[in-house]
Image (spheres, rainbow, N blue to C red):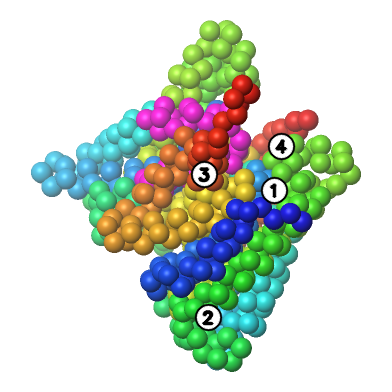
Amino acid sequence: MLAIVLFDGLNYSATLFLLSVGLTFVYGVLRVLNISHGAIYAFGAYMATWITIKLLGVGLPVFLSYLMLFAGAVIIGLVFGPTIERLCLRRIYGSDIHIQLLLTYAILLILDDAMKLIWGMEPMFVSEPYTFIGMFEVGGIIYPVYNFLLMVIAAIFGGFLIWLLRRTRFGKIVVSVIHDREVSVAMGVNVSLVFNVAFTIGAFAAAMGGAFIAPTIAVVPGFAVEVVVMAFAVIAIGGMGSLEGAALGALIVGFARAISIHLFAELELVAIYLIMVLVLAFRPEGLFGQVEERRI
Amino acid sequence: MKIKPAVLIVAALFILAPLVVPSWIMFILIKGLFMFIAVLGVTMFLRGGQVTFGHALFYATGTYTVGFSVKWFGFREALVLVPVGTLAGLLMAALVGLIMARYRGVFFAMLNLAFSMILYAVLLKLYWFTGGTDGLAIGVPTLAGVPIHASGFAFYYFSLVIAGIATYVVYRFLASPVGYLLTALGENEIRIEYTGESARRVLYLTYVLAGGLGGASGVLAAFTIGHVVPEDAFWIQSGEFVFVALLGGFESIAGALMGAVAFEFIQTYASKFIPYAWQLMLGGIMLLVILFRPGGLFAIYESAVEWLRPKKEGIAHE
């Protein structure tokens, strides 16, 4: 029982981290809460599933399916990232928060329906990547290896983003843009390019989360919004814009979810939001967030 | 209080409409009226620079007030249920508002969404209590004891009276000191506190009023549609409120009315011609409005009036 909760908790945390890390990254750099994140995530799941089904259908070996999932995520990230940023977000950086929220919400509505138009209302399912690596037994509990793979992917991806921000030239530029846009421009930084790349990374992260979670679930239309609310809970708990915060938030929400599912399944959603409200009541900026000065 | 002629014209149009239009348009107008009442709440938040993606919370509170009343007591009296539903919405908002008045911006938007999704999940899961996905049937409402048709004359005028009361209440609220401070909330919160007023109190009062409007709208909706379902609390319903507020323009009460009526006509035709791309169209129109006409239909109307007005010679116009 305890071991199951531990495994489930880690598993949920990994999926939640993959889901929310892009959202917090984009918020950190662009200061825009991208509500369409959930739709990009769902698009990633659809695209990856679709590509994998098609390619496995022509007889490619199953061990390549992980690359196919990855390819689906890359395609979605590269298609949606630059276009959404360039065509929509760029026009509203200076606007009030409510305009930014409404705009990304509109994009969510569009993408959510576009998915239904492209792939139909039927659930899509690709189980080969999941069943291929089989099960794993420890202490009498049988657990799918794929769930461990998800944890590894989450850890690698989180590590990659932190490395990118802290150890590379690009990361240093991004940090300087976060601190002060105008001074960065004065120093010769192409801020609009940085924004575009940062948003693309965020979109790719969303699509990547969707792509690798897809084999564990049936991909059905309309899960974009639940996903974005969940992701928001994670990054609000951790502190918006902080990568470590997203990791900690994912762990907290993941374990809360695992525990509540095992104890009182009906209250799963309530438990998550309860934690969010509690954390925000005592630390409105989240656990890792920085207090923003109030403007006069 | 000086009443503008435009207000009288609109009121007269709404009063005379049933005499000339066919009954299907009357049905659309009734839907437009309750949509308008709910959207008034959303526009008040937008004035204060806040967005809510969960206003369906209060709408569903209203619809399920009727649902439970019919289920448990077989009671369908509109004259009683509208105040009761409004009260239920007020109470719900008074409770949730205690938490919500602390938050602004993205937190306000997303926490509202979270609360409405909790209500949706509860309505869905407690099926022995709420009827689950099947929802609850409402049947024929009564008005002062007399059974009436939910898209007939009597119910139309009843909805019109409720909408009139709602308009008046919101108008008085926005013209009150708290109403002016609400507009300031979106501009600069600290300066509100310099005036000695608490920004949190301003948002809380707005929240409670918006909740009551949502409840009233839900009651009328339950009677008109004749059926309440958990989707009343779903995010798509909240999204439609936000869409209407944006389409009409949230700078004025008239904008909400224009948006609501336009929305119901769009929906009627869209379900006929493009049944599978409803959200796509909502999102597309929203995107266009935000990027090109942030003032919505009301701004278009105002610029048309400005254009039609005879220009004075020799005086520079802005």
Q: Residue A258, image x and y in percent?
A: 52, 59
Q: Residue B194, image x and y in percent?
A: 87, 38
Residue closer to the observer: B297 or B230: B297
Labels 3 and 4: the sequence-earlier one = 4
Residue at screen point 62% across, 56% down = B7
Verify whether residue A96 appears in magenta.
yes
Q: Residue furthest right?
A: B196
Labels 2 and 3: the sequence-earlier one = 2
Q: Residue B66, image x and y in percent?
A: 56, 80
| Identity, as a three-letter code, of the amino acid under mark 4 | Glu
Q: Residue furthest front?
A: B313
| Identity, as a three-letter code, of the amino acid under mark 1 | Tyr
Q: Residues within 10 Å of mark 1 (few under 14, many from 20)?
A: some
Residue at screen point 48% across, 59% down = B261
The nearer-to-camera label among 3 and 4 is: 3
Residue where numbered disc 3 is placed: B301
**Disc 3: host chain:** B
Q: Left or right: where does residue A180 sit relative to residue A137? A: right
Q: Left or right: where does residue A205 sit relative to residue A5? A: left
Disc 3 to disc 4, C-alpha distance: 25 Å
Residue where numbered disc 4 is placed: B187
